[in-house]
Amino acid sequence: MEKEIFEDDGSLACLHLPADRANKRFVCKEERQENLINKTFWLQDFFPDVQTRFGTRHLYKATYEKDDPDGKAFKVFTGAAACKYVLEKLAEMGKFPRRVTLKKEGKNNYFFE
């Protein structure tokens, strides 16, 4: 059996620690949905029903390139029903990662295309 070899640069990112599923957290920078409108990125993972000061939201992790390391990932909270539906269906189908473009219609109607 061949042992995986990697360069340990001393960072946490190089260890590829899994997301903290018990506490529903991703260790990466937070991005606002408003800043992602009309941008294409890769949905990598998500947590449903995360309690925030704004109510219950879904939290998703994304990257701009499919194979970007966690150090380049960002997380986004969404309460948009259309986005929540897509995240739930992708999880059910086991279809992460998935490339999407975030769109906005009206005042606060966000959706993935």
Image: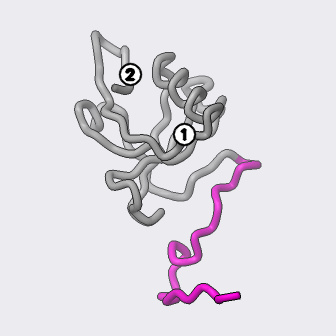
Q: Is residue 91 left or right of residue 65?
A: right
Which residue is more in the foreground, 39 or 32? 39
Q: Amino acid at mark 2?
A: Phe
In front: label 1 or label 2: 1
**Mark 1–mark 2 distance (CA, rounded to whole Å):** 18 Å
Q: Secondary structure at mark 2?
A: strand
Give the x, y percent position of residue 5: 56, 89
Residue corresponding to mark 1: 95
- Label 2 Cα neighbours within 10 Å, binned few <14 / some 14-19 / many ≥20: many
**Residue at the extreme right:** 22
**Residue at the extreme left:** 38
| Magenta-drawn segment | 1-23
Residue corresponding to mark 2: 111
User: Residue 43 falls in which quadrant of the image?
Assistant: top left
Quadrant of the image containing the N terminus: bottom right
Quadrant of the image containing the C terminus: top left
